[in-house]
Amino acid sequence: MLDDIGLIPAIQRYVERFTAGEGLAVDIEASGFDAKLPPQIGLTLYRVVQEALTNIIRHADARHVVVQLAKGYPRVILKIEDDGKGFALEKEPPKEGLGILSMRERVEQLGGDFRIITSPGAGTKIRVTLPLEV
Amino acid sequence: MPNKTKVLLVEDHAIVRQGLRRLLEERGLEVAGEAADGRRAMKMVGELDPDIVIMDITLPRLGGIEATRRIRRTHPDVKVIMLTIHDEEGFLYKSLDAGANGYMVKEKATEDLLDAIDTVLRGEIYISPNFPPKVLESYRRMSQSKRKKVDDFSRLTNREREILQLIAEGYTSKEIAAMLFISVKTVENHRANIMNKLDIHETAGLVRYAIKIGLVDS
């Protein structure tokens, strides 16, 4: 699907379906996606968005999410920020931990950087940067 | 008798300009001047104070959309009608973002140009019948800031994106030059082009923009 319609429309479509009826407002902002991304990079970003939204819906109790993508050079940057309850990173429950681990692993496999900033009551922010040329 | 409506034609093809001039003069309008590129157009707007500018999109030196943006900012009372072969919505939206009052696709110009001029002189937006009737409505519904962000950043080359990020991270032109193995002059040229394309004219604004689109962290 990513190949057919491109990353941003794919993410939009996913978000629309996945968050329907969840009472969650998701803003997607994309800048600079004039040309196609290398397929693994698009797929990794897509998976991170999926995983992050799954976590947000299951655990975060958030009302508002901002998904921001910027195709800079030489890196593409993805930010996902929610206004939910956040969590204490050092004692994250195993279920969430697994999702985060798998996101991190995917990103690092492509030479990228995965960061998560959160604390109880302060929402969660994920920032991913991926080099466009691996 | 009220003054004739004064028109400035901006179009790089002399033959098209001649045709338009004839068409407009036959209908009793005054063609006060002609320009073949965007820079010249900006200058002539200042000199001639036209009521209307008919503006091609694809122009040498300074493109029609950017010229429109500047004209509408410095001379908000001057109306601009885009006259172009492009019938894609992207160009229409960019033109409206730039402040164009009308958008006319060339193939319809002979029949509809006068109608377009009347419409924008009344203070309304004119859009070529090539587009579906609800196009203006959906344009207005879309949040302008979102669309603008997408479009403007896409206009930057990879090198410009790279340099914008470094600027936003606080590096000086000299430092950027050293990092990228290019001359300071080249960095300065890139910086000028970035500012032009984003229509942001100070470094602090570039930094804010880069933060806003998520290119760098606040």
Image (cartoon, rainbow, N blue to C red):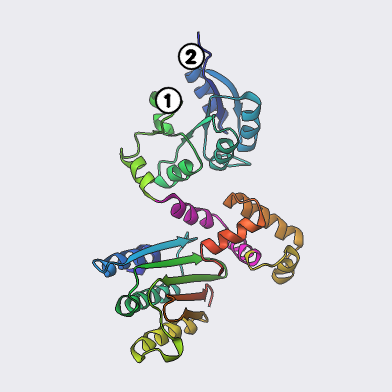
Q: Amino acid at mark 1?
A: Arg
- Is residue B168 visible in this depiction of the protein? yes
Which circle, 1 or 2, is nearer the viewer? 1
In percent of the image, x 49 and y 19: which residue is there? B24
Q: Based on the displayed image, in which of its 4 quarters is residue B68 positioned? A: top right
Q: Is residue B173 above or below residue A84?
A: above
Q: Is residue B140 above or below residue A84?
A: above
Q: Which residue is mark 2?
A: B28
x then y, percent, for residue B218: 56, 68
Specify start and end residues of the magenta stretch as a single range.
B143-167
**A13 left or right, relative to A78:** left
Q: Secondary structure at mark 1?
A: loop
**B105 left or right, relative to B160:** left
In percent of the image, x 61 and y 58: which residue is there? B206
Q: Is residue B177 above or below residue B39?
A: below
Tell which residue pokes out farthest to the left in this image.
A21
Q: Secondary structure at mark 2?
A: loop
Q: Residues within 10 Å of mark 1 (few under 14, many from 20)?
A: few
Chain at tag 2: B
Q: Based on the displayed image, in which of its 4 quarters is residue B190 positioned? A: bottom right
**A82 left or right, relative to B153:** left
- Is residue A4 visible in this depiction of the protein? no
Chain at tag 1: B
Is residue B155 within the magenta segment?
A: yes
Q: Which residue is mark 1?
A: B122
* Separation of marks 1 and 2 at Cα, in angstroms: 18 Å
x then y, percent, for residue B140: 38, 44
Q: Amino acid at mark 2?
A: Gly
Sooner in the amino-acid sequence: mark 1 or mark 2: 2
